[in-house]
Amino acid sequence: MCQQLSLGSASWCQFEGFLNTATPQTLYKHSATMGSSKKLCKTEKMKVIDAHNAGEGYKKIAKRFQLAVSTVRGIIKRWQVRGTVEVKKRSGRPRKLSERTARSLVRKVNQNPHLTSKDLQEDLADSGVVVHPSTVRRYLHKQDLHGRVCRKKPYLRPHHKIQRQKYATEHLQKPDDFWKQVLWTDEVKIELFGHNKQRYVWRKKGAAFHEKNTLPTVKYGGGSIMLWGCVAASGTGNIARVEGRMDSIKYQQILEANITASVKKLKLKRGWLLQQDNDPKHTSKSTMDYFKKRKLKVLEWPSQSPDLNIIEN
């Protein structure tokens, strides 16, 4: 009833009676449909065309399908001009980048991922294509290319890569018993007054200098200490503080004071291996002589190696 009722074709009394008897849901549905255009599907549009081909006039078709005469006229005209009842796709603003130019952008980025959107914009400007850097970024995003922070890794020369591969090949099939007999060692520096890196806090505007939102600092960084430690598959060994500057002699003194005790504590069997990185004080001539004198076996370790040492964790 609500769809057929209108103020132009019914008396005010009828409309008032409708308001008195209609439920809130009916009133909401009626108000939602008022003033909104009806979108027709392709099947309904073809019915209009069939009726027109059968000789019916615009007004008769409009009344039959409860459409506006202008809607019927538009459907029929579109059919006569374009041979289809489908609405033509909106073209929008023409693209600034041609397919060929866009492909060249992707090719340049694949060849040199360090290029910025500004660099690419300037390259395009040299060839006569003027676009904003955001246009360049938007297209690269569509190609699943996104700007990300570079991961840092040790610089590897060709002989470093060869050594890495050699080490991996020789140790890939080593049994668990082999790794259980390795004593892993390393040094670490610990800041005494917080961390010397950027920190984040949740705060409101204007509260940057509230005490709870600040990171206290002291002159000269507050100092730090260096520790030497060792671990094995069976647990943790000794830990020692490094006093003063660490050099080859001091490193040998730390090993002398802690290696034997740690091996006994961790119950490593005869033939155990000592692991250390390639720090100059670890590989100096005097340190190598110390290992030879003490008959210590050192696990081969490639230069510029990734942190495979389990003590890092």
Image: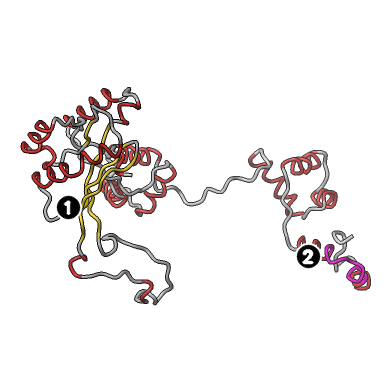
Which amino acid lies under the numbered mark 2 shown in the image of this protein? Ser
Residue type at mark 1 is Val
| Residue toward you, 157 or 278 | 278
Residue at 81%, 41% in the rendered image:
51
* Closest to the observer, 295 or 116: 295
Residue hosting label 1: 242
Which residue matches tag 2?
31
Q: Position of residue 110 (x, y in %)?
A: 32, 38
In what element is the residue under mark 2?
helix
- The magenta-colored residue range is 17-26
Q: Please tell me whether mark 1 or mark 2 is closer to you in this view.
A: 1
Q: Quadrant of residue 305?
A: top left
* Residue drawn 42% across the image and 46% down it: 141
Q: Position of residue 38 (x, y in %)?
A: 74, 54
Please indicate whether residue 149 sits to the left or right of residue 260 in the image. right
| Discs 1, 2 touching: Cβ within 8 Å | no
Verify whether residue 241 appears in magenta: no
Q: Position of residue 231 (x, y in %)?
A: 29, 41
Give the quarter of the figure containing the N terminus: bottom right
Q: Quadrant of the C terminus?
A: top left
Q: Is residue 101 above or below residue 72?
A: above
In this view of the protein, which residue sits in the foreground, 162 or 103? Answer: 162
Q: Kindly identify the residue that appears in the image at 37 percent across and 41 percent down.
A: 102
Q: Position of residue 209 (x, y in %)?
A: 34, 76
Q: Earlier in the sequence, mark 1 or mark 2?
A: 2
User: What kind of secondary structure does the magenta stretch mostly adopt?
Assistant: helix
